[in-house]
Amino acid sequence: MRTASLIVASIAALLLASCSQPPFKADMLPGAGPRYAVDPYWPKPLPNAWTLGQVAGLAVDRAGLIWVLHRPATVAEDEKGASYTPPRARCCTPAPPVLVFDAQGNLVRSWGGPGAGYDWPQNEHGIYVDPEGYVWIGGNGLKDHHVLKFTAEGAFLLQIGKPGVSGGSNATDQLGRPASMEVDQRANEVYIADGYGNKRVIVFDATTGQYKRHWGAYGRRPDDAKMATHNTESPQFANPVHCVRLALDALVYVCDRTNNRIQVFRKDGTFVRQYAIEPQTRINGSVHDMILSNDPLQLYLIVGDGSNSEVHIIYRPTGQKLGSFGRMGRLAGEFYGLHNLAIDAKGSLYTGEVRTGKRVQRFTKAPQ
């Protein structure tokens, strides 16, 4: 029975991937949407008196392992007493930047940091594990104009761009403080949300790093001129272009964070539509991250809103908001600096927090 279900799901995914538009019907009703409950015991405490800094990247791989990218340099002085010589306290010391957990919350692997042959970012930002198991990492420090590709064990494979000076939003050999990335396995292309310095999506060959194409808001040539933010009708992306996600139906979703919107494109950069998300929001904008639900039609957009400290459930066919959960705070199920999202095969959500939140939480999907 399980095998038959997997075959049906695989066929559905292949059919969806061949379509340029979602196979939605006009009379489809959104229902209540998925609901979630916080798991206050996930993950388990870190070993070695390790502690987390700002969590700036989350991913789930095909084996169901949860990947966390954090910023060791953001661990405050009074949080790392054990790292001094002599120790100032029994706890703690910053954990390695890449941490991998199993579904039970056990730490199963850790690595990362400067090494031979590549430039580790000044300020870690964004992690993605592609279908082949390769790990992509970015950074948004002032000189971070590159992304890195590693094996699952941390062996270096590829660097696109280099630290130093960005060439702007129309450079083809250099990035501009990239925020996130995702790989199209069929085309062997990596899409990069670029980012905190540039205002575009850019695509490279995922093996060689060869430039393919790029675009700005509405599929236009990007422009680095300064524009007012918090404008859902802006002709350009604002900084940061904070996420890029690929749907099964071959559409590309882009988080235009401080313009409070998600824009949708075909893979060639053709603009399709946009969704305004809490358009009255100011501060840092409302679209910090976005993932698609894992039902066969990916009916829901799950949006992490760091300014309002909520996760929104959006019905993808219409853009209707079905509900939200969370609030500002540091208790289980609350958020302070909500920044990243990931989803596993069972539909559980994982959230990461920056600022002084500095944690990962899991929310399990409630039965419908």
Image (cartoon, rainbow, N blue to C red):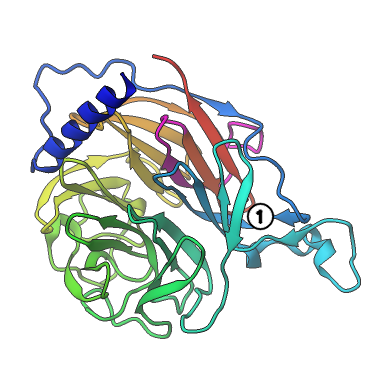
**Label 1 CA crowd tier, 10 Å (few <14, some 14–19, many 20+):** many
SS at mark 1? loop
Q: Residue at x 15, y 39 (%)?
A: 14
Quarter of the picture containing the N terminus is top left
Q: Is residue 228 left or right of residue 138?
A: left
Q: Residue at x 79, y 58 (%)?
A: 92
Q: Is the magenta region chiefly helix, strand or loop? A: loop
The location of residue 120, given as percent across then percent down, is 51, 75
Q: Is residue 287 visible?
A: no
Residue 128 versus residue 219: which sits nearer the camera? 128
Q: Which residues are magenta?
A: 328-348
**The stretch drawn in magenta includes residue 343:** yes
- Is residue 130 highlighted in magenta? no
Residue 263 to residue 368: above or below: below
Quadrant where the image shows the C terminus? top left
Going by the numbered disc 1, the residue's amino acid type is Leu
Q: Is residue 28 above or below residue 306?
A: above
Residue beneath label 1, please?
A: 52
Q: Residue at x 49, y 45 (%)?
A: 65
